[in-house]
Image: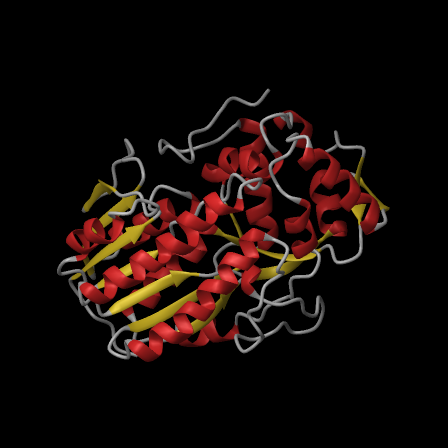
Amino acid sequence: MSAKTGLRVVVTGATGNVGTSVMRALSGDSRIASVLGLARRVPDLAVSRAAWAAVDLAGEDAEEVLVRHLEDADAVIHLAWRFQPTHSPVTTWRTNVLGSLRLFDAVAAARVPVLVHASSVGAYAPGPKTGPGVDESWPTHGWPAAAYCREKAYLERVLDSYEQQHPEIRVVRMRPAFLFKEGAASEQRRIFAGRFLPGPLIRPGLLPFVPDLEGLRFQVLHTDDAAQAYLMAVLLDARGAFNLAADPVIDAQTLGELLRARVVRVPRRAVHAAVSAAWRVHAVPASPHLFDALTRMPVMSAARAREELEWQPRYTATAAVEEFLRGVRKGSGEPTPPLVGHLAH
């Protein structure tokens, strides 16, 4: 594949876990001339050859604002996503789905030739947990009870029509596994476990046990490795969907080794009941529906990304989890509104 040079790239959701890594990956490549990061709040973060602007995709005037920012852009990487409040799916729908529709329309109106969209393993229908992994042809129906999966799957259907309506736009859909890095640990702790989980408890040897339950096999990728795939999707003439994941697949045994904790078989129903009870009283932000989705998500094959995007993860999945756990213990974060860290307590 031939690479293009001197590109102007716009990134939505540029201050989050993936966005900060993508901004750095783009700015560090000589083939990218300039980068504009869009977010609801402009950060105090310096990235070479990059500028920032504030846009709220949930705003009714967002499309008009976006068109102005996308003028003369060579590519748009769409990462903006709102995970909370999980108790108000209408709120997340307004940003994640309606906001994405505004962004897609703005890309077409501004005649941007490339759209790289952040989908997810969460868009996939339940599938096998073993074997070589599903490829990109696996159905993207999501797990309907989980808002995150439902929204990701809905946007897959939107893009099916969008590609037919706008054949002049090269559309790429990234479907990464769970993305971790130390600088996003505080944000992810707040998103999934809430503020009440003591960071030092995650230190190896302190947890009494790791639950081993049916379906607890999932894939992980370091966020910086995902960012390299996004960069290559912009530079190379790639189209369609790409699974992104690193080896090995994470399971209870792997977590037990990382945390030096016993692995104890626990019925999935018992864990679901505990998560449901905690979520109902707002003790944890992650919904039981997302837990259900996690235990049903298929293992993916990333062979297409390795071949067509010339991509190879630098970090193993275990190294990415280790870095995340270290970040949770330290209260790590970056100087952006979503990622700001807090001292572990």
Is residue 312 visible to the viewer in this orientation of the structure?
Answer: no
* Quarter of image, res 218: bottom right
* Rendering coords of residue 171 (x, y %): 34, 71
Residue positioned 59% across, 63% down in the render: 142
Above/below status of 218 relative to 38: below
Quadrant of the drawing holding the C terminus: top right
Toward the left, the furthest residue is: 72
* Rendering coords of residue 54 (x, y %): 25, 40
Quadrant of the drawing holding the N terminus: bottom left
Above/below status of 96 relative to 325: below
Front-most of 117 and 303?
117
Residue positioned 30% across, 57% down in the render: 103
* Rendering coords of residue 145 (x, y %): 64, 55
Residue positioned 43% across, 52% down in the render: 96
Front-most of 252 and 83?
83
Front-most of 139 and 136?
139
